C-alpha cells in the first residue's frame, strides 16, 4: 500500500549569513491515512521545519534543497504554485503554536474559519458556516452556534486553540500538521485541547503530524513517534514500544527527564522565617483584586514553590514582594523587618538581598551588554568592586553557573537559551542574595536544559544557603525542587504546606485538578483520566450538570457585554 | 579599520551614498583651497554660459557658480549638521525622560510637543524669525526645536518598547537611577532607529534651511547656500538658462546619498538578510 504522504531524504537548508546551512539533514517520513505521527525533539531539532515541509512550504530564509515530498501520488517539490495553493489549507492544514498570534484580531472566528473553503470555491458561505458550527460542537466548544461570532480576544486561550483546530478542519483535510498546539497552555487547558484533537482526528480519520517537545503529550495522541535531534532522525517506533523500550540513549534521556525528585529539606521544618508575606491584597489600577489576602512564609535555605494556572496571581505576588507593585493591603516582612511597599523607598542593602530571575532570559539580558557588564555592574553597584578584582569575581561567578571563563566578553545573543538563563542566575548570585525569586525560570527552556538549570539551582542552594520563591505552573518542576508548596487559584491560596503533605491525598479540589492534569508517559493516561473524571462527575452530579466547577464563565461574560 | 571592513561588505548603493557624502564633506572642508574663485567675488557677466573659465557658468551677479556651490556645501552641511545634532539632543533626552519616568512628566512633555507640532512648521519658523530677527544661531535653535518634536515622538516610542523589557526591570530592582538606566540600558538599544532617523532628519533640515532661504529668512546674502542660490537664480529659468538647477541638483544629490547610507544602516540594524 502506498502512503498518503511520503517524504524521502528531505534536506532543508536555512540561510545563515551568506551560506546555506542544513536544518533538516535527509530525513525520511511517511504517513498513512488516519495515522497520527508524533515528532519529538528539542528546539532547533528541525521538527517544525520538517512539519511545514509536508506542505512543501518553508519559512522565510529556508529552502528545500533536495529530496521528494509525495502527497497522494504527487511530488509537491515539483508542483506549481497554483497546485500547491489547492493543497495547502485544503488537503493539508496547519495548526500553529500560538493561536492568539495566528488569528486576525479584527475578524470574528467564524469569518476566519469559512475563509478557506469559500476562497477555494468548495462551499458556499452558508454551508461552510454550518460545517464550522458542527466542528465547534464536535470540539466541545461552549455555545457552538454563537461562539463563531466572537472575536479572538473574547474567548479563552484553550478555546482559541480549538477554534484554530476547527479552522484547520474546515476543508476536511487529509492531513493536519499540529505544531506544538498546547505548549503555551496551562495543564488543565491542555487537556481540553488534547481531547478535542484526539476526538476529531478519530472521527474523521484525519492523518496528523503532531509536533511537540513533550513526549508525554505526544504519547497520548500518536500511533508512531519519530525522535529528531539536530535535523536527524534519532529513533522511530510505535508509541507503546518506544516508551516501553527506547533504543537510543537520547530517547532514554527524554523519557527520564521528569523523574528527578528530592525530599523536603530539613530546614523546612524549623521555624526560621526569612520572608513573610502578611495579608497582602493587590490590584492593577482600580480593577479587581488580583491577590486577595495572601499569607506566605519562606524559611531560610528552603524553596517555596508557588503553583497555579496563568491568571492565578502568582507572578503578581512576585511583583509585590520585589516592590514593583505596592500592595493595597498587607506587609512584606524580610528578615524580621518590614520592607517599604514601594521599590523606590527600599535601601540598597535590602535590594541586594532580594534578587529575581526571569522566565525569558532573552528579554532579561540587555542584548547590547557583554557579560562583563551584565555581571560586573551588580558587583560594582553593591560592593564597589572594580578592575582586576571585579574580573576575577566575574570568572568565579561564571564558574559557579558552569560557564567557561572566555564567555566574559560575549554578548547574550551569542549564547544558547540555557546558557543565558545561567547568566541570569549568575547575575542574581553576584549580589549574594538571601532570597531569589524565580519566575517560571525553566518554562522557556527545553526539558533537558531545564533539568540542568534546576540541578544547578539546587546545587547553589546547598552551597550558599539562599531561599527560593519559585513561581511556576509546571508541577514536574515543583515536585523536583520544592520544599513547600503554595497552590494559588484566582488570586487566592487554596492550599499550602510541606511538599509531601500537599502532594499526598486527600487534596483540595483544585490541587487535585492540577495534579491529575500533568501528562504522564503512558499512552492511556488521557483516556483513563477522562474516564475517571466522567465517573466522578456522574457520581457527584446525578443530574449531569456542568462539570469543572472551578472554571469561571469569563469569556461568555465578556461576550454578553 | 572596522569601518573599512564594513564598507567592503556593503552593497553598491551604500558605497555610492558614502562616496556622495565624502565628496560633499571634502568640498565643505577644503572649500577655500579647491574653489577657483572667492565666495563673493564677481568674476564675469551675469548668467554667463559654461566656459573653460567658469565650468558651470556664473550666477545672477556674475559670480562663479562652481565656487558658490562649493562654499554652499560648507554652509549648508555645517548648518544642517549642527541643527540636527541639537534637535536630537533635545528630542531624545526629552523622549527618554518621558518614557522612563512616565506619569505627569510624560504628560507634560508630550503635550508641549503636541502644541509645537500643531503649528505648521514653516509658519512657526517664519513667525519666530521675523520677531527675533534673522541670524544663524536663531535659525539653528528654531529649526532644532521644531525638529526635536519629531525626534521626541520617535525616541519616546522606541524607549517605551525597551522600557518594558525585563532587563530594564532588573536594573530597577537593582536600584539603578534613571540616568544609568537611560544611558546603559535604553540608549544602546535605541541607537539603530535613532541613527537612521538622524540621517533622514539631516536631509529634512537642509531642505528646510533651503526653503527658509528661498523665502528670504534663512542665510543672508552674500553667504552662499544652496537654497538661496536656487531662489536668487530662479528667474533664469524663464530665459531657458538652467543655472538654478545646479544648486537644486546638489541638494537632491546629497539627500539621495544620505538616504542610501541610512537604508544600508537600517538594513544592517534590522538583521535582515538581503
Image (cartoon, coloured by chain):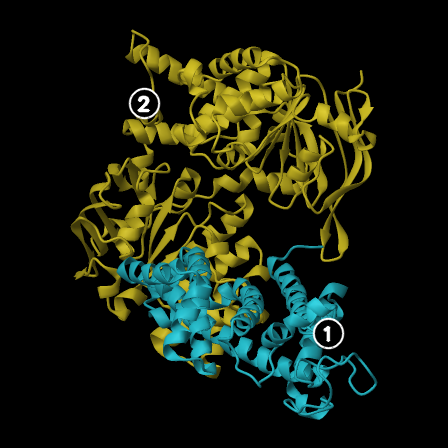
Along the line of sight, the residue nearer the viewer: B48 or B132? B48
Marking on residue B19? 1
Tag on residue A406?
Answer: none
Q: Which chain is cyan?
A: B
Task: Say which chain tag 2 marks.
Answer: A
Q: Quadrant of residue B25?
A: bottom right
Which residue shows up at 45% across the image and 24% down it?
Answer: A192
Q: Position of residue A165 (x, y in %)?
A: 54, 24
Q: How many marks?
A: 2
Measure the alpha-carbon separation of dots 2 and 1.
64 Å
Query: In the rendering, at what x and y percent does residue B205 appear?
Result: 53, 70
Mark in front: 2 vs 1: 1
For chain A, what colour was chosen?
A: yellow
Residue lying at 61% horizontally and 22% vertically, measured from the top left: A116
Residue A24 appears in the picture as rendered: no
Residue marked by disc 2: A560
Label 1: which secondary element: helix
Task: Check the image and report above or below for A492 versus A361.
Answer: above
Query: In the image, is B250 to the left or to the right of B221?
Result: right
Q: Residue furthest front?
A: B239
| Left-right relation of A214 to A335 | right
A80 vs A487, nearest the viewer: A80
Q: Which class describes the residues within 10 Å of circle 2: few (<14), some (14-19), or many (20+)?
A: few
Amino acid at each position: 500500500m502506498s502512503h498518503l504522504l511520503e517524504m524521502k531524504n528531505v534536506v532543508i537548508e536555512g540561510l545563515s549569513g551568506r551560506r546555506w546551512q542544513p536544518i533538516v539533514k535527509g530525513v525520511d517520513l511517511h504517513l498513512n491515512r488516519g495515522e497520527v505521527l508524533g515528532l519529538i525533539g528539542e528546539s532547533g531539532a528541525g521538527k517544525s521545519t520538517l512539519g511545514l515541509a509536508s506542505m512543501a512550504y518553508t519559512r522565510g530564509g529556508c529552502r528545500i534543497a533536495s529530496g521528494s515530498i509525495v502527497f497522494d501520488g504527487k511530488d509537491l517539490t515539483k508542483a506549481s504554485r497554483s497546485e500547491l495553493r489547492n493543497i495547502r489549507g485544503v488537503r493539508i492544514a496547519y495548526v500553529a503554536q500560538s493561536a492568539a498570534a495566528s488569528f486576525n484580531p479584527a475578524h470574528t472566528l467564524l469569518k476566519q474559519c469559512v475563509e478557506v473553503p469559500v476562497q477555494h470555491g468548495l462551499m458556499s458561505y452558508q454551508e461552510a458556516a454550518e460545517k464550522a458550527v458542527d466542528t465547534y460542537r464536535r470540539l466541545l466548544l461552549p455555545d457552538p452556534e454563537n461562539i463563531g461570532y466572537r472575536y479572538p480576544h473574547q474567548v479563552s486561550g484553550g478555546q482559541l486553540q480549538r477554534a484554530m483546530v476547527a479552522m484547520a478542519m474546515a476543508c476536511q483535510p487529509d492531513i493536519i500538521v499540529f505544531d506544538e498546539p498546547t505548549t503555551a497552555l496551562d495543564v488543565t487547558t491542555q487537556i481540553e485541547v488534547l481531547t478535542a484533537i484526539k476526538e476529531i482526528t478519530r472521527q474523521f480519520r484525519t492523518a496528523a503530524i503532531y509536533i511537540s517537545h513533550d513526549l508525554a503529550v505526544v504519547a497520548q495522541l500518536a500511533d508512531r513517534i519519530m525522535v529528531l535531534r539536530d535535523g536527524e532522525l534519532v529513533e522511530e517506533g510505535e508509541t507503546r514500544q518506544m516508551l516501553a523500550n527506547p533504543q537510543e540513549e537520547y530517547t532514554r534521556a527524554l523519557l527520564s527527564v521528569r523523574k528527578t525528585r528530592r525530599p523536603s529539606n530539613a530546614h523546612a521544618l524549623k521555624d526560621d522565617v526569612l520572608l513573610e508575606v502578611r495579608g497582602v491584597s493587590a490590584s492593577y489600577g482600580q480593577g479587581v483584586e488580583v491577590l486577595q489576602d495572601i499569607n506566605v512564609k519562606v524559611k531560610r535555605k528552603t524553596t517555596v514553590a508557588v503553583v497555579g494556572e496563568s491568571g492565578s496571581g502568582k507572578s503578581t505576588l512576585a511583583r509585590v514582594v520585589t516592590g514593583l507593585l505596592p500592595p493595597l493591603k498587607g506587609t512584606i516582612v524580610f528578615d524580621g523587618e518590614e520592607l517599604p511597599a514601594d521599590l523606590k523607598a527600599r535601601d540598597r542593602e535590602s535590594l541586594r538581598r532580594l534578587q529575581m530571575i526571569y522566565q525569558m532570559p532573552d528579554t532579561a539580558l540587555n542584548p547590547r551588554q557583554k557579560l562583563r557588564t551584565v555581571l560586573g555592574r551588580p558587583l560594582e553597584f553593591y560592593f564597589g568592586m572594580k578592575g582586576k578584582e571585579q574580573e576575577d569575581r566575574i570568572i568565579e561567578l561564571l564558574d559557579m553557573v558552569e560557564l567557561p571563563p572566555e564567555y566574559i566578553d560575549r554578548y547574550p545573543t551569542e549564547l544558547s537559551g540555557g546558557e543565558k538563563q545561567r547568566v541570569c542566575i549568575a547575575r542574581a548570585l553576584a549580589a549574594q542574595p538571601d532570597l531569589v525569586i524565580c519566575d517560571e525560570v525553566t518554562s522557556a527552556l527545553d526539558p533537558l536544559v531545564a533539568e540542568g538549570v534546576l540541578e544547578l539551582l539546587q546545587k547553589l542552594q546547598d552551597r550558599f544557603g539562599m531561599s527560593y520563591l519559585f513561581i511556576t505552573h509546571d508541577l514536574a518542576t515543583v515536585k523536583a525542587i520544592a520544599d513547600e508548596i503554595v497552590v494559588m487559584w484566582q488570586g487566592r491560596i487554596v492550599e499550602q504546606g510541606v511538599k509531601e503533605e500537599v502532594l499526598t491525598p486527600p487534596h483540595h479540589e483544585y490541587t487535585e485538578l492540577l495534579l491529575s492534569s500533568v501528562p504522564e508517559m503512558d499512552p492511556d493516561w488521557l483516556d483513563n483520566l477522562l474516564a475517571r473524571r466522567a465517573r466522578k462527575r456522574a457520581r457527584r452530579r446525578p443530574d449531569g450538570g456542568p462539570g469543572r466547577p472551578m472554571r469561571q464563565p469569563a469569556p461568555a461574560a465578556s461576550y454578553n457585554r | 579599520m572596522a569601518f573599512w571592513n564594513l564598507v567592503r561588505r556593503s552593497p553598491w548603493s551604500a558605497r555610492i551614498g558614502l562616496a556622495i557624502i565624502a565628496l560633499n564633506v571634502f568640498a565643505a572642508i577644503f572649500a577655500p583651497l579647491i574653489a577657483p574663485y572667492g565666495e563673493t567675488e564677481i568674476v564675469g557677466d551675469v548668467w554667463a554660459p559654461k566656459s573653460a573659465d567658469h565650468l558651470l557658468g556664473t550666477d545672477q551677479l556674475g559670480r562663479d557658480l562652481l565656487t558658490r556651490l562649493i562654499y554652499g556645501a560648507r554652509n549648508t552641511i555645517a548648518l544642517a549638521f549642527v541643527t540636527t545634532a541639537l534637535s536630537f539632543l533635545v528630542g531624545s533626552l526629552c523622549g527618554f525622560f518621558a518614557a522612563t519616568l512616565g506619569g505627569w512628566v510624560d504628560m507634560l512633555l508630550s503635550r508641549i510637543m503636541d502644541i509645537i507640532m500643531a503649528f505648521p512648521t514653516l509658519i512657526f519658523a517664519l513667525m519666530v524669525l521675523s520677531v527675533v530677527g534673522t541670524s544663524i544661531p536663531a535659525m539653528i535653535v528654531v529649526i532644532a526645536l521644531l525638529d526635536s518634536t519629531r525626534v521626541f515622538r520617535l525616541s519616546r516610542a522606541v524607549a517605551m518598547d525597551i522600557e518594558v523589557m525585563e532587563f530594564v526591570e532588573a536594573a530597577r530592582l537593582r536600584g539603578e537611577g534613571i540616568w544609568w538606566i537611560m544611558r546603559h540600558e535604553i540608549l544602546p538599544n535605541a541607537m539603530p532607529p535613532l541613527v537612521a532617523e538622524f540621517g533622514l532628519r539631516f536631509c529634512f533640515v537642509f531642505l528646510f534651511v533651503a526653503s527658509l532661504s528661498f523665502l528670504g529668512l534663512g542665510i543672508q546674502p552674500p553667504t552662499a547656500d544652496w537654497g538661496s542660490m536656487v531662489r536668487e537664480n530662479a528667474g533664469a529659468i524663464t530665459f531657458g538658462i538652467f543655472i538654478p538647477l545646479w544648486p537644486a541638483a546638489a541638494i537632491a544629490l546629497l539627500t539621495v546619498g544620505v538616504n542610501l547610507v541610512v537604508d544600508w544602516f537600517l538594513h544592517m540594524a534590522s538583521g535582515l538578510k538581503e
